[in-house]
Amino acid sequence: YVWPSPQLDALESIRFDQDRNGINALITPCSLFIFAAPGSGRSNAADWIRTAYHDMATHNITDGTGGMDASIRFAEEQARPEDVGDGFQNTLAVLLAVSNRYVSSTSAISIGGPEIAFRGGRVDAAVPNLPGVPEPQQDIESHIAAFARQGFTQTEMIGLVACGHTFGGVQHALFPDIVPELNDPNNAQSVSHFDSTFVTFDNNVATEYISGTTQNPLVVGLNDTTNSDKRIFGSDGNATMASFANSASLFASTCANLIARMVDTVPTGVQLTDPDNVDLTLSVDQKTIQFTGALRVWNLPQTTTHNVRVLWDDRAGGTNNASLVQNKVVTSSSGRNTATWFNFPTLTLDASAGITNMRFAIDNTVEDQGGVGFAIQDDLIWSNTSCINDGPTVTGQLAIAVRNDLAPTRVYLESLGRDNVDRPIVVETELALQPGAGNALYAVWSGAITNAQQDFTIGAEIGGVKVTRNDIRSVFNFPPCAT
Ligand code: HEM
């Protein structure tokens, strides 16, 4: 994608900036289960993947209803026999809290699985979807029909079930007719696992099935009616499962494709470079703009030192440049990628020339998103007349500088809220124009802030159209208010 994109920037930050915004800690180690004492036999990771499938499984390819839309959060869906168990509640309890989007592919990646492509833009449902998650007692024809409705062929059904059932297992409490009480202190919730390596992504679900050693309770369960994996895996004479047993890499690449499709994604390559937190703050006298930020470069060899510079264009036709300083090196996504961070020095720009675009020179290579550069807008920016009032209750004042050619009808701060069905929504806090606070270049709009913890982005309405500037700040980013 082309930076900046507030939505994709946020999504990829959760996925790739594990040291800052990640959810890896919730699935590290892969066997972690935070809702019971160790040795429960369950894992957060397995819950998340099952949740993603159950959310998607209501999809109807013909009429386009259902799918990955987080409708699984509705009590009505969770009360259905097809959605038995507390795994969905557990998943949503943590994922709704740490992200503002529904991110599910992350768990599989971090368990050593294949890297799964993803795209953003899922929209949370306002109402529950129609039922449609397959259940183990149904016959093979219903399963083929259910996966066809979800958009998967019979071969893809075998693959997707095998990819899902490399994690976790079946719980006695939920399926007492399939799994007996195990009386095992290391498996306190009596979970009969699908393969011997139930917290790892590998092809053992297939090798154990083909070699006849499988303990998968949906294959060798005593009640043949609920042996749905046996019917599904055997439905093409075991051809697909044999191919997975023969080739771990075929299994991994098939799962990467199928799970990517399951979470409604198209492949996208990792960006080589990606600016982050590019901050513009107008000075008190409104004659200069402070320009700061950071650059993340993927997979830069660490053997030599690097010469990294930011080049930027201004509205007066000038081009400028400055050297960046290497900061930290972070390995993310289970060691697959290394991010090297470079900090901008604090650059002081002449506000009358401002800034329009930037690009980077990394050693001898120019990174400019294929020639378009990285666009920067200096029309709606934070004013450093913003300030914080420390005390028992922290409050403050946030101010936005608005370039005079803009003439907005409203300027406001945007923050994240939830509507009455828990969908993320944008809450707007109005700011007022401060007559006399501006100058020939910028006007100043400001307002009092009572919730100091709240993060804000900048919003304005210009000619009836709403615009957003995604430079996130709270009062903690500003100096103390004058007393
Ligand atoms: C015909 C299709 C399927 C049937 C009948 C089925 C059935 C089941 C059943 C009965 C359980 C036990 C749930 C529990 O006791 O907590 C289970 C667990 C699980 N399923 Fe499936 N499943 C199907 C397809 C899939 C697919 C396509 C995926 C993902 C790609 C998936 C992922 C999982 C995972 C990860 C678990 C383990 C959950 C845990 O241990 O907490 N399943 N499945």
Image: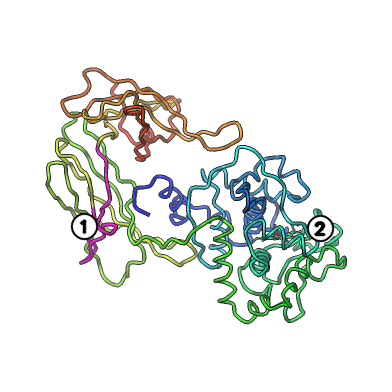
Q: In the figure, is residue 370 to the left or right of 56?
A: left
Figure colour scheme: rainbow
Disc 1 marks a residue whose amino acid type is Arg
- The image quadrant where one finds the N terminus is bottom left
Q: Mark 2 points at which residue?
A: 172
* Screen quadrant of the C terminus: top left
Residue 209 in which image quadrant:
bottom right
Mark 2 packing: few (<14 Cα in 10 Å), some, or many (20+)?
A: some
* Residue farthest top in this picture: 435
**Residue ID for mark 1:** 309
Q: Can residue 80 be seen at all in this image of the molecule? A: yes
- Magenta stretch contains residue 134: no
Residue segment shown in magenta: 359-378
Element marked by disc 2? loop
Q: Does the segment drawn in magenta span residue 368?
A: yes
* Sequence-first disc among 1 and 2: 2
